[in-house]
Image (spheres, rainbow, N blue to C red):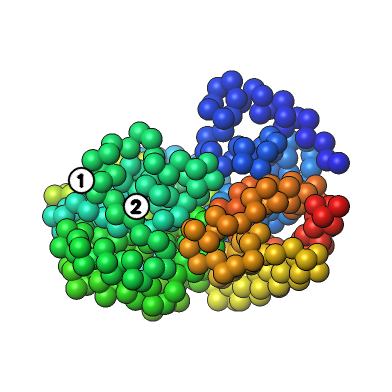
Amino acid sequence: MLNFEKSKQAFKESSQYMPGGVNSPVRAFKNVGGDPLFIEKGAGSHIFDIDGNEYIDYVLSWGPLILGHADPKVVKDLQDATTRGTSYGAPTLLETELAKKIHEIVPSVEMMRMVSSGTEATMSAIRLARGYTHRDKIVKFVGNYHGHSDSLLVDAGSGVATFNVHDAPGVPKDLAYDTLTVAYNDVAGIKNVFKAHGDEIACVIVEPIAGNMGVIPGTKEFLQTLRDLTTESHSLLIFDEVMSGFRAAYHGAQDLYQIKPDLTTLGKVVGGGLPVGVFGGRRDIMEYITPDGPVYHAGTLSGNPLAMTGGLSTLEQLNDDLYKQMFARTDELTRGIKQAADDHHVPVTVHHVGTMWSYFFNKGPVNNFADVQKSDVDYFAKFFKALLQHGVYTAPSQFETNFMSSKHTKEDIQKTIAAFNAAFDDVSE
Ligand code: PLP
């Protein structure tokens, strides 16, 4: 058994000062039982806790680290940038450079604003959509998570699903009233909502590939229906690609499905492990933002030079060959997991798109949040802890996604498949 004594003590102390001992809820391991690991360092595909245990890491800071931990070029570029100061509150060349790079990779983002988190990106995109259309209602999908701003917390995925707080205490009822929710992939459901409220809807926001209830790809018909309905009703379609951007595919889910949203939100990989979010899209809509237009948006640290450097240094290193390698490794890993589960007669549904992957203890099919809820979360908790003992660190919730990085080797994949087999042995005993 691994020794977690130092993490245990550290958690006791952190719990005196921070609710749940953490700064973001799913980190707390509360849903799987036990105490969270305190991390000392990361290197490539591996992380090390303060007790000296080493793990192959598939959380990767919940997605951003597509180049793995402490990528040498990212570290060097950040070191150099720091010597020039940490923030100026005035324009820099770095912001335009990153904006150009993002536009090159995701061409529908004609203009954009940099922010400091995915939450800020989606919150600002929603305000912009409301300001542009002069409408209040928005539509989101059950089990999709778009960060923790008020309008978007209703029926959300990720920690909201993990800890079952769907009625979002603290969100004014009047605000929640303007958020209409529909089941994910429910074509008839969304058509009905538009029939009843089409001319009141400012926007539909969707994770085109959901990642906050495990990985669930939107169907082509579903996403095309969203495009058609929003166009007909003069409301806006927002693809929240905070997770799927640069991960489901190099050019994002919008390229995979060949559907062009009006606005896109990005985060995670776009900052390479530093706090960056982006909202952007059609030029005529983005021109509604202050100081050119009336919709307010600002930020002391928006476009921060260190954050821009982390993003640029990461995006500049991505290329088709790296994606081919990561996709092949994800394929190999998920096939191995399915085989391991089958060999142990454990019902499992394994999903992956690009570098995003997850497994549900559920015989499937898994197409929406109601399907995910049929998963055996008790088995998941036991299995998660067994995997840790075998040196594999995955997301500590059935309602989350795991990721692949460019640093995961063939050997890592083989070791991980062996760890899954060993964990199935342990849990089946
Ligand atoms: N949108 C999606 C799709 C996400 O997955 C997340 C975070 O997981 C967010 C928005 C919120 O981003 P952040 O945690 O950076 O605020």
In-front residue for pair 369/25? 369
Is residue 143 shown above or below 1? below
Sooner in the amino-acid sequence: mark 2 or mark 1: 2
Mark drawn on residue 41: none
Task: Write down the residue under mark 2.
Answer: 122
The spot of residue 401 in percent (x, y) is 57, 57
Quarter holding residue 220: bottom left
- Mark 2 or 1: the one toward you: 2
State yes or no: discs 2 and 1 in contact (Cβ < 8 Å): no
> Is residue 143 something that shows in the picture?
yes
> Is residue 160 shown left or right of residue 200?
right
The residue furthest top is 16
Callout 2 secondary element:
helix
Disc 2 from disc 1: Cα separation: 14 Å
In the image, 122: left or right of 30? left
Q: Mark 2 vs ligand 1: CB under 8 Å?
A: yes
Quarter of the image where one finds residue 14: top right
The location of residue 429, given as percent across then percent down, is 86, 52
- Residue at x-position 19% and y-position 51%: 136
* Amino acid type, mark 1: Tyr
Front position in the image: 130 or 317: 130
Q: Which residue is mark 1?
A: 296
Provide residue 307's location: percent of width, then percent of height: 45, 48
Viewer-side residue, 415 vs 110: 415
Label 1 CA crowd tier, 10 Å (few <14, some 14–19, many 20+): some
Q: Which residue corresponds to the image point at 43% horizontal and 50% vertical from the top-left?
A: 156
Q: Residue drawn 73% across and 47% down? A: 382
Residue in the image at 78% along x and 49% along y: 386
Q: Is residue 355 left or right of residue 35?
A: left
Amino acid carrying mark 2 in the image: Thr
* Label 2: few (<14), some (14–19) or many (≥20) C-alpha neighbours in 10 Å: many
307 relative to 247, above or below: above
